Image (cartoon, rainbow, N blue to C red):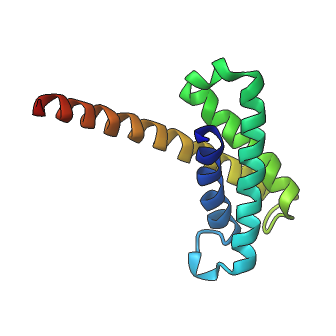
Amino acid sequence: MKIFLTPFCEATPACLLVMVQGNIWLATVGHLLKAVETGLITAVGVFILSLFTYRWFSNKYVVAGITGGMCFIADFLAHPSHFGSASTEAMVTGTFTALISLVLNMLGKKIFLHLRKNSSSIH
């Protein structure tokens, strides 16, 4: 479930923010639906890829690259670019998703280690 949910939660907000070029006040229900579609395509793609290459998923940089690459493909398929050439928005969205993946991976590990350290000192 995590291999599906995590890329979905990384790609959807990235797509929405890039689609409205950072101005969240311009977002409409249509934008949100396209972002959810992009997130779902990304999540399904990462999940299917993980079935064949699960050992790669131990490296956070590979995970970020796979998630960003799948988001690029999903964004390109889901809707036309709102700026630049035909693939510019998809490239920006994929890159932003990869960065979100890396940041969440690093923060998640720090939070886990912090909680683990504090829970062991309680006992």
Q: Position of residue 20 (x, y in %)?
A: 67, 72
Q: Residue furthest top?
A: 55
Q: On the rendered structure, is 64 left or right of 77?
A: left
The residue lying toward the viewer, choosing from 31 and 89, is 31
Q: Quadrant of residue 109?
A: top left
**Is residue 95 in view from this perspective?**
yes
Q: Position of residue 77 (x, y in %)?
A: 87, 55
The residue lying toward the viewer, choosing from 29 and 51, is 51
Q: Quadrant of residue 34?
A: bottom right
Q: How many marks?
A: 0
Q: Residue at x 69, y 71 (%)?
A: 32
Q: On the rendered structure, is 89 left or right of 1?
A: right
Q: Position of residue 31 (x, y in %)?
A: 72, 73
Q: Residue furthest front?
A: 123
Image: 25 above or below 122: below
Q: On the rendered structure, is 71 left or right of 113?
A: right
Q: Residue at x 71, y 63 (%)?
A: 36
The quarter of the image holding the N terminus is top right
Q: Residue at x 70, y 67 (%)?
A: 19
The quarter of the image holding the C terminus is top left
Image: 54 above or below 113: above
Q: Position of residue 72 (x, y in %)?
A: 77, 47
